[in-house]
Amino acid sequence: MFKIHEQKYHPDLDPKRKLYIETYGCQMNFSDSQIVGSIMTDNNFETTDKIDEADLIFVNTCSIRDHAEQRVRARLQEFKRYKKLKPGLIIGVLGCMAERLKSQLIDEEKMVDVIVGPDAYRDLPRLLSIAETGQKAINVILSADETYADINPVRLDSTGISAFISIMRGCENFCSYCVVPFTRGRERSRNPETIVSEAQDLFNSGFREVTLLGQNVNSYKSERGSGFPELMERIAEIDPALRVRFATSHPKDLSDELLKTMAAYPNICRSIHLPVQSGSDKILKLMNRKYDRQWYMGRIEAIRAILPDCALSTDVIAGFCTETEDDHQQTLELMKWAGYDYAFMFKYSERPGTVAEKRYEDDVPEEVKSRRLKEIIDLQQELSYRSNQADIGKTFEVLVENFSKKSQKELSGRNSHNKVVIFPKHDFKPGDYVNVRITACTSATLKGEAII
Ligand code: SAH
Ligand code: SF4
Ligand code: F3S
């Protein structure tokens, strides 16, 4: 008797199996799905956007608010149907919900075969081989150093113009409301050489914009001690035709040095996302944001002084624990003062395990949260409209990304301020830089004519 060396797949003999990935949550999660896509394509899978064809369904999940988790749970119920149609189908839950709920999720959602946390994606092939034997497989170990630096992401659903690059992982800020430090673990920065070469490769293959991603990019630090401004500089120097963006900046760490670096490079986009969360000092303290209203306003003044033509966007939470009408008014006032061009706005959602859940009562009634959120959204709508109206008559350089959603005769792109600009196509195509004079707007988009 001799034993045949066991090898599950033979690349030349076995047809590739199909992986369908659905992604929820932040840009980091979308970027992670591309890493997962790459690991799986190295293991004899190919990605598909047709769920009925899939041999493997992954859902990369978000835990930031309860609503995000509920959406995934509803989706998992729908996946049961595909499992009935294709008995060998494997369903995996990835990302923050996997990390937060661990094996509990398998107990609660019986259709799930594999649970994988955000630092364990290299283990996916092994976990799948366990799942193929009919057992449940789980790895939710967080790492202090995993950055997937050597993995070349598969650019899923990409237009080939704009790409995200994760430059760091994890978060240690422990804002009292936030689940991310628990689901993503320790903060760690990726080696700058691998980031620069990824950006260079993207540029060489036709990409014209990269967005550097991290929960708090300003605390990026390489092993040799170089910081975020140096990294930005190196990426900006790849080519003046490569646009550079970044997200997210924590206000406590936004340095003048970074603003000066931005000012020195026209290809670093004039747009800063600076989440304020609340305009009340009392609430900011309870949130453990580590800055107060005055500090935040000082940072905006620094932006205005060093980068006079810079767009500003923010995140706001309505109805955090103990928030009074007066606190809420202070948020609205600060929004007006800052005149944000854009904002992401949320109702506070209590997350299990956070300091806010343990120590503070979620005491703002649901209807009050809803009303305050509506006031915040209405105000922002007005601010966005006003900001767009002020652009009428101005000319912007627009990087064309795609055809407009509404018409093949129109192109859609963004200006340096990150505003969407729609204009008639002429002979332009995605990837072109076009000077567009703005002639009209809504609160969400600018419309214009190309200057030929
Ligand atoms: N790291 C980024 C934010 C990541 S989460 C930063 O600190 O700026 C994105 C946004 O979700 C946060 O800015 C916050 O506004 C919102 N958010 C986070 N936890 C929340 C919760 N428990 N309830 C409601 N909104 C929340
Ligand atoms: Fe969450 Fe705060 Fe970290 Fe942002 S900085 S991810 S809000 S803990
Ligand atoms: Fe959500 Fe996790 Fe991102 S909780 S917002 S997917 S880091």
Image (cartoon, rainbow, N blue to C red):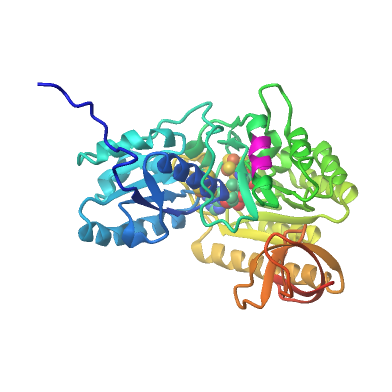
Quarter where residue 340 is shown = bottom right
Please give the name of the residue rendered at 88% of the width and 53% of the height, measured from the top-left corner: 308
Q: Residue furthest front?
A: 12
Q: Position of residue 212 (x, y in %)?
A: 66, 43
Magenta-span inclusion, residue 356: no
Q: Please determine whether, in this image, residue 353 is positioned above or below residue 245.
A: above
Quarter where residue 114 is shown = top left
Q: Please determine whether, in this image, residue 384 is positioned above or below residue 47.
A: below
Region in magenta: 195-201
Please give the name of the residue rendered at 30% of the width and 52% of the height, measured from the top-left corner: 55
Q: Is residue 172 visible?
A: yes
Q: Please determine whether, in this image, residue 395 is positioned above or below residue 308.
A: below
Please give the name of the residue rendered at 20% of the width and 54% of the height, measured from the top-left corner: 87
Q: Position of residue 241 (x, y in %)?
A: 78, 51
Q: Residue furthest left?
A: 1
Quarter where residue 390 is shown = bottom right
Quarter of the image for the C terminus: give it. Answer: bottom right
Q: Main secondary structure of the magenta part?
A: helix
Q: Position of residue 105 (x, y in %)?
A: 32, 45
Q: Is residue 322 visible?
A: no
In-front residue for pair 166/312: 166
Please give the name of the residue rendered at 46% of the width and 55% of the height, measured from the top-left corner: 68
- Tell me: 15 left or right of 429: left
Q: Please determine whether, in this image, residue 21 is positioned above or below residue 390.
A: above
